[in-house]
């Protein structure tokens, strides 16, 4: 079973690279870990169906950096509070994962945080249809990480998906999870 101390040690040992100046839009997501008696869980959201970009997709709470954000950590925390109502004082930031560029021109900085297990959800239905927890052991199990290939602008690239109950976790969210799982191996 995965534990918090193993995650903290792996994040501390990561040779984290700072984002380079690029034409990609800086953004951040919170990778929210919740400790439960049954093991660690990740909190994920289902984006609202009426959104212009990525409607109905499974994602981490997060979004693009605002001019008022002093850092990408602040972006991740602000977006988490806006989307699911978890305040900053319920989140302990423990590290960053490697940057994740997307084909939609975003550079995502995943920020790993431990969320108090007694958090209350207040979903903003303008942005999110629902939020749910998934066992980290399930997501980090290689058997549950389905790999396929897609073509975009003449290039083939790997795409991961992780079907879980009624949800299909794929795209950048699944790639962040796979990268995180590799960090702990």
Image (cartoon, helix red, strand yellow):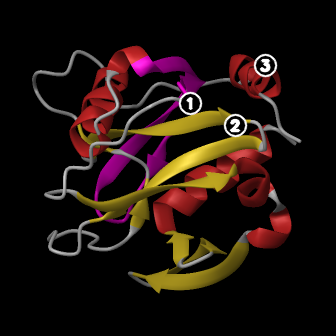
- Find numbered disc 3 in the image and state the secondary structure of the residue it sits on: helix
Number of the label disc, if any, that sits on residue 117: 1
> Cα distance, mark 1 to mark 3?
21 Å
Which residue is depicted at the point 82% across and 26% down? 6
In the rendered image, residue 77, in percent from the top left (x then y), is placed at 33, 27
Q: Residues within 10 Å of mark 2 (few under 14, many from 20)?
A: few
Q: Which residue is at 76% across, 59% downward?
A: 138
Please report the residue visible at 47 percent of the width from the left and 24 percent of the height from the top: 18
Decide: marks 2, 1 in contact (CB < 8 A)?
A: yes
* Local SS, label 2: strand
Q: Please provide percent x and percent y for residue 82.
A: 21, 38
For marks 3 and 2, the one nearer the N-term is 3
Quarter of the image that includes the C terminus: top right
- Position of residue 102 in the picture relative to residue 40 (left or right): left
Q: Nearer the viewer, residue 166 or 12?
A: 166
What is the magenta range? 90-116
Residue at point 67%, 23% (across, down): 15
Q: Is residue 19 visible?
A: yes
Mark 2–mark 1 Cα distance, whole angstroms, equals 7 Å
Q: Which percent across, then down, holds residue 110?
A: 48, 38
The N terminus - image quarter: top right
Q: Which mark is residue 36?
A: 2
Q: Secondary structure at mark 1?
A: loop
Residue 22 appears in view: no
Say which residue label 3 marks. Answer: 9
């Amino acid at each position: 079973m995965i534990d918090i101390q193993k995650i903290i040690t792996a994040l501390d040992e990561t040779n984290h690279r700072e984002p380079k100046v690029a034409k990609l839009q800086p953004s951040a997501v919170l990778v929210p870990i919740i400790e439960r008696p049954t093991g660690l869980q990740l909190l994920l959201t289902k984006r609202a169906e009426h959104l212009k970009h990525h409607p109905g997709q499974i994602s981490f709470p997060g979004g693009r950096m605002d001019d008022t954000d002093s850092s990408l950590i602040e972006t991740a925390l602000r977006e988490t509070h806006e989307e699911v109502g978890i305040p900053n004082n319920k989140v302990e930031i423990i590290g960053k994962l490697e940057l994740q560029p997307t084909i939609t021109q975003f550079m995502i900085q995943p920020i790993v945080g431990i969320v108090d297990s007694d958090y209350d959800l207040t979903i903003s239905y303008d942005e999110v249809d629902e939020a749910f927890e998934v066992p980290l052991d399930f997501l980090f199990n290689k058997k549950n990480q389905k790999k396929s290939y897609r073509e975009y602008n003449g290039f083939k690239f790997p795409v991961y998906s992780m079907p879980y109950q009624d949800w299909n976790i794929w795209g950048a969210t699944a790639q962040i999870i796979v990268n995180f799982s590799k960090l702990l191996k």
